[in-house]
Image (cartoon, rainbow, N blue to C red):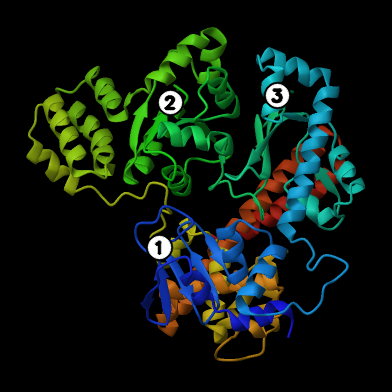
Amino acid sequence: MDDVSEIKARLTIETLVGQYCQLKKKGRNFLALCPFHNDTHPSLLISPDKGIAYCFACQKGGDIFSFYQEIEKVDFPQALKDLAEKAGVELKEVRQKPAVTKDEKERLRECLTAAEEYFVAQLKASGVAQDYLKKRMISEEQIAFFGLGYAPDSFSQTYEYLLKQGFSRTEIVKAGLGVQRELQDGKIYDRFRNRLLFPVHDHQGNIVAFGGRAIGEEEAKYVNSSEGPLYNKSAILYGLHYAKEAIRDAKAVVMVEGYFDLLACHKVGCHNVVAVSGTALTEQHVKTLKRYAETAVLCLDQDRAGQEAAERAFHLLAREGMAVQAVTFEEKDPDEVVKSTPELLGRILHDGGVPYLDLVLQDLAKGDVSSATGKRAALRRLLPLIDSLASSVEQGHYIGKTASLLGTTETALREDIAKLPKQVIGKSTDEETTSVRAREGFSPLEIALGLFLLYPLKRALLQELIEPEGGFSGALYGALKKAPEAKELKLADLELSDEHRERAGILHLFCEYHGFHEWSEGMAVREIRKNCMRANRELLKVKQLEITRRLKEARLQGKVVEEAQLSTQYQQVLKLAQMAG
């Protein structure tokens, strides 16, 4: 038995977690308040059978090693040493080389760090990039503080540099720095070309991704790293590691939309600021912010899209019990304000804005609130916002203000609020049984594979699923195909790496936690087929977008033969997509 297996055999997951959390028995499992986020209802699920402790709310945890690494903020070698001591296991030998090779995430961080150093050097050497930053009024101090860099206008220069630094093709792609266009020819291209680059970090300050702003006339103004082992855009907030102490001190966080908006706030001395990068605000973002702040100040773009983003943000923030303020200005965004009147932006942010709902009421008061049509429109906007408030007292306050504005009674408004459908802002709107996966970290493809773990006798339905290429899903798909026929599948019997076996255990636990194992045979078949269809649709959509992108490149470069081949591929994928519904 190797060291890892012996430690796991002697130190159970419930024993380890019990040293940090108070456990409550629930059937075969235990529940606890999650130590990784501001948990009020026990959401950490501990499974002695699977040796896993996992929170599906913040998507953290795993086996004893993953749990310990997360809670103690140590790497795997240190976790191995510490847990061996706890378990009374003497590590078999002191090796001349490291006890364990660096895990995948550490290698990807090193790859990103090497890329960051390269991009910084490229920025210093690029007159075009330097001129662009001067035009945007970004100082040398900010360039250095935020680690800004430049990706050269080349399809392979960054990739070739990283190869020379000792990183593999797979590591470069998984780090989100390379794109493999065609699996057959295996050629890899740089993801970032002719772009100003902003390093993106997690809350601990570890680099996880880049955001790239086009300097030339590229079709996409912004390109972000692809998601991978390090980067989950639904969980990462740009600038949080710079801001968290200032947020704690102020008990408030200023929220902006873009990288340059965040830099604008720093220019005027506002350091408790974060930006959402690459996605809309999510529940996970809000749960992270709630650890540090009581109040959120929305400093978003003043156009229609910014107003819609503010409304969506209010729903998410208010539901979590955060106070929501908002600031307004004549210019489009904070970056434009700081260029014209920096003292104005400083004053606006220092004042902290006004309650968001007060702004909405002021805006509605400027329009028609006397006719039946006008009142109906106002109610459509106001009532869902009031319903999102976590405090009954605060709800009562704004119901009173709304009644006064519309010339109606508070009782009538409460009756209308009671009729509102349950809000699903920030969650999957799919009402089918397995829709919970969207907010808990699993794709339809993974859910489908998880159902095959629960119902191995239905593995004939695997043929209805387009075979995934690589990664965890590809490994689990292959392991399921090779697994022996049995009424019950054990994870130990599947041909998986330790990392993929742990992920499969979490997926299995997720499916059991939501009661998928209690279905009738007929329902199991229906749900497996539904998720196979969803997975196929998602995969084909991604393929369509990828082929479309490559088609445009082929046309621009005059590659007639390649363009014809891609057009044929596109038609084939389009037919498959139509068949998949």
Q: Is residue 307 left or right of residue 484?
A: left
Q: Residue furthest right?
A: 164
Residue 57 location, x and y as percent?
45, 58
Q: Amino acid at mark 1?
A: Leu
- Disc on the earlier residue, 3 or 1: 1
List the residue tagged with mark 2: 304
How would you rate the neighbour count of disc 2 (Cα within 10 Å): few for under 14, some for 14-19, many for 20 or more? few
How would you rate the neighbour count of disc 3 (Cα within 10 Å): few for under 14, some for 14-19, many for 20 or more? some
Of the pair 145 and 153, the residue shown nearer to us: 145
> Is 380 placed above or below 360 here?
below
Q: Amino acid at mark 2?
A: Arg
Residue 179 location, x and y as percent?
77, 47
Query: What distance separates the C-alpha of mark 3 from that of mark 1?
Result: 41 Å
> Is 520 placed above or below 330 here?
below
Residue 550 location, x and y as percent?
76, 43
Nearer to us of marks 3 and 2 is 3
Q: Residue furthest top?
A: 340
Tell whether label 1 touches label 2 (CB within 8 Å). no
List the residue tagged with mark 1: 33
Who's the residue at 44% across and 33% down the image? 249
How would you rate the neighbour count of disc 1 (Cα within 10 Å): few for under 14, some for 14-19, many for 20 or more? many
Q: Which image quarter: residue 498?
A: bottom right
Tell whether label 1 touches label 3 (CB within 8 Å). no
List the residue tagged with mark 3: 143
Question: Element at badge 3?
Answer: helix
Q: Quadrant of the N terminus?
A: bottom right
